[in-house]
Structures are given as C-alpha cells and as structure tokens.
Image (tube, rainbow, N blue to C red):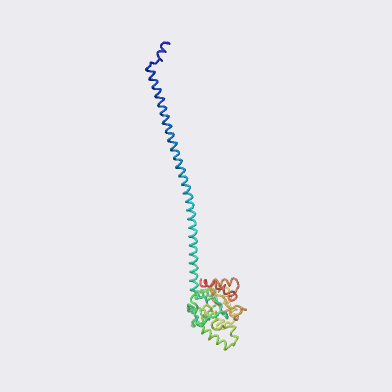
Amino acid sequence: MEHFSERKFSLSPLQLILAILVIGAVFSYGFYRHYLLKEDLIRLEATSKNLEGVIDSLQAHLASTTVLNRDLNDFLTILKARNTDFQNEIQQVSQKISTLEKLNSIDPELLQKYSKVYFLNENYLPSELSLIEPEFLFKPAKPIQIHSKVKPYLEVLERAARADNIDLSILSGYRSFGTQASLKSQYTVVYGPASNRFSADQGYSEHQLGTALDFTTKKTGEVLLGFDKTPSYKWLTDNAYRFGFILSYPKANSYYIFEPWHWRFVGVSLAAYLHGESKYFYNILQRDIDSYLIKIFD
C-alpha cells in the first residue's frame, strides 16, 4: 500500500515544470487582472472626479441662473408696477379731460345765485329751449318754454304728480331779459318800491336761465295766493327734489317774499342734498354749489 501511494503522488520533473508553469500563469493572470482592475479603478475615479467637477459647475450655473431669474422676476415685477401706475395716470388724465369736456359743455350760469347776487345781461340766452307740452300748462294755448335738458325732468315730475292725483299746472317758465324788464316795470307802476319784494329786476331773475318755473292749480289760478295751503305745494315739498327741483324762496329768506310756487331745477344730486340736509340753495356757499354743476343733468 505504501509503495502504491508513493507512486501515485510522485511527479516527474516534466510534470513538476508544467505544474510550476501553470501556477505561474495563474499568478501572472491574477496579477494582470489585478493590474487591469486597478487601472479601471483609477479610470473610474478620474471619471468620477470629472463628473463631480461637471456637477459642481452645473450647480454653480444653476445657482447663478436662479439668481438671474430672481433678478429678472424682480425687474419684471417693477416694470409691471410701473406700467400699472402709468395706466392709472393715463386713466386719471383721461377722466380729467372727460370732466373738463363735460364741464365745458354745461352752462356755468345754471347754478349761479341770482336774485340780487349775480347778473345776467340782456344777451344771455339758454343754450337750448323747448316748448312745454300743452297738457302741463295752466293755459294750454299760451306757449311756455323751458331749458331743453330740464324738460324731461319736468315731464316726469308732472306725470308723477298726476299719478298721485295732484293738480299741478305750469303758469310761467323761461322769460327773456326784455320780458322781465317789462314785467318789473308793470309791477313798479302798480306797487311802487314794494315790487322789489316779489319781482326781480331784469338780469337777476332765475326765469332767464330757463330752469325756473311757477306752478299753480286750478283753484289758485294766476293770482297764486294760497298755493302754500294746497296739496300740490305739500307734494312738491315732499317730492320735487327727486326730479331735481328746489324751492328758491322759502319763508324768511333774505331776497323776496315767500314764493311757494317758484321752483328751480338744480339737478337731482344737489336737490337731494339740500332736501336731506334741510338747507336752501341761497344759504350755502357758491363754491359748494359749483361742485354739483358737472352732475346737474345726470
């Protein structure tokens, strides 16, 4: 048995050389493989470093781009705000121009205080005059004129009064400078200086504006006495402001006797203000009245 074992595991010189060569080849391949792997590792590490550099570069670019975008957004926001301000300025200027154009189209005399305060010369005429419908006149056959832009308000007032079963007719409307002069002359002849308490001199009458009216009823007629005791006067006191009309000469005014029949158009806004505050036209400042001129026909 021992001889068999020795024979079995003994190597010849040739076999030993071959074994050594094989082992050397294996180790050489291992070293070569190790070398290749090391080279791959070095190359990968270099690539990784390059990638890190690229990543750092991209991150830096992204950061700078973010800052640029933020700056651009801030600049855009500023531009938008400036554009909005510019548009607002344009709108304000346009509104001012529109307001001035509207004011230029409105007769500034329409809200002035007359009645011994301001004067209308003999050449003054309302910009537009229209005939009042005969159905609203005390004497349908006697034509009466009114400012054309006041006429629609007057017609609505008259129809509202009729809807409430109120007897309300128009006795007088527009009077020219000459007509007022003739009328005042007649009153002066009959009443003397006392006429100054109930009749305006020419140039100082609200009737010349074409926006003042004298109302009456079938009962009071042309004399007008007792008009303040009628349901018509009460209705006007409660409702005329809704149509832009105000009582010019209330009790205890400083200009003329109490004239419950004499009503003047000043526009719905001003009339509503005066009614709500229980004030009268001639008792407030002219500059406060003037602020309502632009709204007189609104």
- Establish if 132 lies above or below 74: below
> In the drawing, does residue 10 fall left or right of residue 281?
left
* Name of the residue lying farthest toward the bottom: 189
Please tell me in which quadrant of the rendered image residue 220 appears: bottom right
**Label tally:** 0
Is 290 in front, or is 61?
Answer: 61
Q: Residue furthest left?
A: 14
Q: Quadrant of the N terminus?
A: top left
Give the percent coordinates (x, y) of residue 197.
60, 83
52 vs 15, left or right, is: right
Q: Position of residue 2 (x, y in %)?
A: 43, 11
Foreground residue among 74 and 252: 74
Q: Position of residue 209 (x, y in %)?
A: 52, 79
Q: Nearer the viewer, residue 110 or 52?
A: 52
Expressed as whole percent of the image width and height from the top left, the position of residue 135 reads 49, 78
